[in-house]
Image: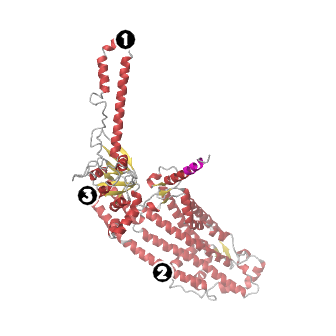
Amino acid sequence: MESPEPTNTSLKKDDSKLAKKLSRVFSEDYAKTDITILDPRGAAINQWNHLFLIAALISLAVDPLFFYLPVIKEDMCLDEDMTFKITLTVIRTIVDIFYGIKIYVRFRTAYVAPSSRLLGRGELILDSSSISERYLRGEFWLDFLATLPIPQVMTWFHIVDKTEMMSTKTSVLYFIMIQFVLRLYLTFRLGSHISKQAGLVANVAWVGAAYNLVLFMLASHVIGAMWYLLSIERQGLCWVEVCDNETECKHRYFDCVNVNLPSREAWFPTSNVSSICATTDNYQYGLVEDAVTYSIASANFYKKYSYCLWWGLRGLGSAGQELQASPFIAESHFCILIGITGLVLFALLIGNMQQYLESRTKRLEEYRVKRMDTEQWMHHRHLPNELRERVRKHDLHKWIATRGVDEEEILRALPLDIRRDIKRHVCAELVRRVPLFDQMDERTVDAICERLKPVISTPGTCLVREGDPTNEMLFIMRGHLDSQTTGGGRTGFFNQCEIGPGDFCGEELLTWALDPRPSVIIPLSTRTVTAISEVEAFALTSEDLRFVAIQFRKLHNKKLRHAFRVHSHQWRTWAAGFIQAAWKRYKRRQEAGLLRAKESSSTPSIKSKSNRKKPGLSILATSVRRGRGDDDDNVIRSPMPKPKDPEFLDDDNN
């Protein structure tokens, strides 16, 4: 009775292992999975990222606008613009909803297994628990803190006592900047991710210059809003200092809610607040002197915002050199912030403007020159638009995948042992996915990895053409291809199939390389192979494959021969033709048997009538039985010749 328990446990373990194995797919296989996990390279995630980026930019522009909520009335009191406050709250809440959706999408987005990367691509992990665990240990808490509605809470639910003056409450608004900095960091990361995925830098040269200009304008927008809030606080401090010198004055009188109090109405006409704090002659406002002189805090929003933005641009453009600050500690720190930020942003703006407009990088400039030469060459040769578009797509895809880095050149500059270890790290696990290589020992795999060359193809690219010399053998790592043959151009013969990851093409070269006495002439390809989607593969040239063939001879022939025949499309096509020929032979024999049964079961009267027709029936039965008089019953003839088997060594012990 106790025996089923370990069986159930082992079954559960096997099921969990199988589920874990099935939860790893490549991007092109993602569309075939019936799950709700999103592909990080798919069109849906790309659209969501653009929406999130727009929402993040709106958030960065909206948050500093909360600093413009306090306004100064004519009666020397502070109030809030309620209409503007409601508008900002609604916009900020909508943006926060997008941040919440972003967290949900991140929980439903697959990630690429680091151990399976190939030229920037790799295997997708679709297990929801693994995705959630990785996200919770990573960026979840940053996204969660960025989603909190801090500006709404700060402006609608006052933390300080309601009896306190509004200038004291405005200082709470500076906490908004903490979340602003966090969202700014996340926006930079998202923008960089979108740029890498889409290859925007490779397409448009002025994007980087415009990006730095927008960054400079955003910094001016923030500095202007902080300067406005600082001017409000400085005027409030002036009111407090004058109020402390008057016995009948109370701090709550400067809140517009209390403007109609009888005690305030009796105090205000006799107070010195208007004469001292309304001008810059009797009080040193320092950095915010312009705000008091031009009554910026009492102006309408558009006039107020335009002047503050100009002040921010002027301060950052001069790196704080023209600013005249008072000994007030907040002003000193604010001027230091403006000086440092202005120097950094101005250096970035000027440097990146020149870098993007002239040459972002040497490699990018070489890419543009090469692309220009290609365009001129295609125009000179009058290539059709279809061919030109294919050339452009291939160049752009290769640039996005490799960023113009010549991997072979980098590896050639390294010592042999380092080069071998790097090749093993990059290729070994992926090479093992090819069934033909799965039976090899580590030394043979190292020899193969050392000679493999990456191949990148765009949809529609013809990798191998029927009748051409087979110069290399391709091992597909990612993507799908269409393989077809006409059997050497025979009339009425056509075979087509689809090959994908783990398959290979150009097996004629392997047969040639394993021949003990190979000819000098390279064999011709028997199939035409065309890329259906983006394809990443490894290629072994005829010389390299000849070297690897020596290693093949040390392996067990039965396993290799079985794997070769199962995954060889020549053998598959021959097997399909053999089965069809056997089926046709079976049907002919069955029809002949039915005719014989009809002849033997006929009545004598019918026999006499049929005797006159017997020669015709006999001829038909004989022709069907003999396969139209040409084939032998004991021989099954396939419509195509049997492929030649590679010369694997025999090993009776395996």
Residue 236 visible in this rendered orientation of the protein:
yes
Pointer 1: what residue? Answer: 604
Q: Tell me the amino acid under the disc marked 2.
A: Leu
Say which of 541 and 263 sits in front: 541
Find numbered disc 1 in the image and state the secondary structure of the residue it sits on: helix
Residue 568 is left or right of residue 33, and the answer is left
Residue 385 visible in this rendered orientation of the protein:
no
Find numbered disc 2 in the image and state the secondary structure of the residue it sits on: helix
Q: Is 8 covered by the magenta stretch?
A: yes
Please rate how many residues cluster around mark 2, counting C-alpha atoms within 10 Å: few if below 14, some from 14 to 19, many from 20. some
Pinpoint residue 158: horizontal percent, then vertical percent. Answer: 69, 72
Say which of 554 and 418 sits in front: 554
Q: Main secondary structure of the magenta part?
A: helix
The answer to whether residue 65 is above or below residue 503 is below
The answer to whether residue 582 is above or below residue 452 is above
Q: Tell me the amino acid under the disc marked 1.
A: Pro
Q: Which residues are magenta?
A: 4-11
Label disc, if present, on residue 381 of the rendered structure: 3
Pinpoint residue 322: horizontal percent, then vertical percent. Answer: 51, 85
Pointer 2: what residue? Answer: 343
